[in-house]
Amino acid sequence: MRGRQVFLETLLAHGVDRIFGNPGTTESPLLDSLLDYPQLQYIVHLHEGVAVGAANFYGQASGRTAFVNLHVAPGLGNAIGMIYGALKNNTPMVVTAGQQDTRLRLRDPVLGHDLAAIAAPVTKWSVQVERADEMGPILQRAFKIANEAPAGPVFVALPINVMEQETNVPAGKPAHLFSASRPDPAGIEAMARLLIAAKNPTIVAGDEVARAGADKTLEKLVERIGASVWFEGLRGRNSFPTDHPAWRGTLAFDAAGIAEQFADNDLVLMVSGPFFEEVWYAPGSPFPPGCKVLQIEAAPSRLAYNFAIDAGVIANVDAALEALWLTTTGVNGAAARARQEAFRAQKVSDDAAQKARVQKAWSRTPTSMARAMAEIRNGTPANVVVVDETITANLDLFKTFTFSGPGDYYSGRGGGIGQGVAGAIGVAVADTRRPILCLSGDGSSMYSIQALWTAAHHDLPIVFVILANREYRVLKHNIDAYRQRFDVKSNKPYMHMDLTGPVLGFVDLAKGMGVAGTLVTKAEDIQGAVAAAFKSGKPHLIEIEIEGKR
């Protein structure tokens, strides 16, 4: 058996049925063998970064290990930013790339470089297969490491001559591991005592709650103890229903801002996440003085990594939350219900404030973000899945749409832009039963606009909505923050942050890649355009002109 056959048989053994890739010469052994393996669907991309971005969201949406095949040194380099996003998203992923013939190693071949070294900083493990006998064992280990908590991408380089070598070592087989650990009863008891004693607890729900399917368990714990719930500033999933009165929103991007949000809390329970990804330095702790801090993690590497904690448990997230629910029967029920009533009153107030905000901005020209989001929602099917890269419109998105379950919403982590348009491909490949809405800013979308061609090529009925404010709005906000934080006195204009001269024409870009498009310049036309795009059953791009930074 040749190395390429062992390679493909190992993929099948590990449940891979889709390869996200961008073909090249060193990938010839794989591409030439695909006809012999009809079980494997190759999702074609025009850029390596888009392939990895799609695979990242596919792994999140499908719950399976994503598999990617890239092309040598420049191709792998093109994908590094998206691999970083997959690492931050904790997506189980095996990334491979064709490598030049090892017999050319001393001749400095075209496109040659140390691929494993390139990928190492953004992966959990990075290795090159040196002989065909290693193919099965290395891939078997790659799948194992990719799925170990916290999950993430691994990289395997595949020299073209190794793919053609003969070997008697068979394909690697998946290990049937039962790794869901039970929580230490002493740790749960310690946490429960602190939760029962807390006067105003809050919970930060990390992405792992959604990935573990623990959202319902979290919800019943929240209701028992009368806790509020926050998401991290950057998150890939929603781990708690956003229409629940206890949900408070997303955390700030600096310690001082988070501390202000926690100011009234005497206990914070952090459930499975990096805690916290900050953008700006601020001195001090994100927790108010005297606040008790608890943490649940699936792996020891994150537990008490950034902060001293009063109690921490390593366990399967759902099992730990269930154990806490069972052990907190001594909570003061009247006090918990009183907090829940306060949350309901706060939600009514927040909803009224958003309604007033939308009405105040209703007639602005160009269309305000608040109205644009309201009109988009009115034109969208009730069971829509949202793939989000709105950035500065994110607040309006969450105040307009309701995300009830973990499969309703996907986004990127790590802060690298371009993940949304690429990621929508992966979500569509993973879930063809529900309509998919991709929301992106104009600047972000240009990092992976080639994804439109893949949507057309594979006939993926995604509705892409580009919110075009003709600027990098988030950078304008950030330069304001920079000037304030570093006491820079300036009335200078925003340099190199406007997307004009020329203006980007997204409908024309879409047409050139086989996707129909609609340009909307009037707010009253948004709802109808969105509804028509979904009704078409085809990939469709809608460019909506919205207001810039005021």
Image (tube, rainbow, N blue to C red):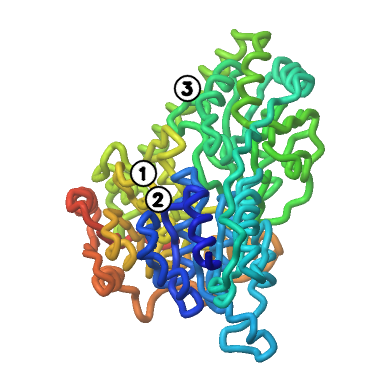
* Mark nearer the viewer, 2 or 1: 2
> Is the C terminus in the top left, top right, bottom left or bottom right quadrant?
bottom left
* Mark nearer the viewer, 1 or 3: 1
* Mark nearer the viewer, 3 or 2: 2
Quadrant of the image occupied by residue 212:
top right
User: What residue does disc 2 label?
Assistant: 427
Q: Which mark is residue 344?
A: 3
Residue type for callout 1: Val
Does label 3 or label 2 sit earlier along the sequence? Answer: 3
Residue type for callout 2: Val
Question: Looking at the picture, does residue 252 appear above or below residue 178?
Answer: below
Question: Looking at the picture, does residue 80 appear above or below residue 307?
Answer: below
Quadrant of the image occupied by residue 185:
top right
Residue name at image x 60 percent, y 23 percent: 227
* Percent position of residue 472, x then y: 47, 67
Mark 1 nearby-residue class (10 Å; few <14, some 14–19, many ≥20): many
Camera-side residue of 16 and 35: 35
Camera-side residue of 135 and 179: 135
Residue name at image x 76 percent, y 28 percent: 292
User: What residue does disc 1 label?
Assistant: 385
Gap in angstroms between the C-alphas marked 1 and 3: 26 Å
Gap in angstroms between the C-alphas marked 3 and 2: 33 Å
Question: Looking at the picture, does residue 191 appear above or below residue 519?
Answer: above
Classify mark 1: helix, strand or loop. strand
Classify mark 2: helix, strand or loop. helix
Residue name at image x 56 percent, y 39 percent: 231
Mark 3 nearby-residue class (10 Å; few <14, some 14–19, many ≥20): some
Gap in angstroms between the C-alphas marked 2 and 1: 9 Å
Q: Are marks 2 and 1 in contact (CB under 8 Å)?
A: yes
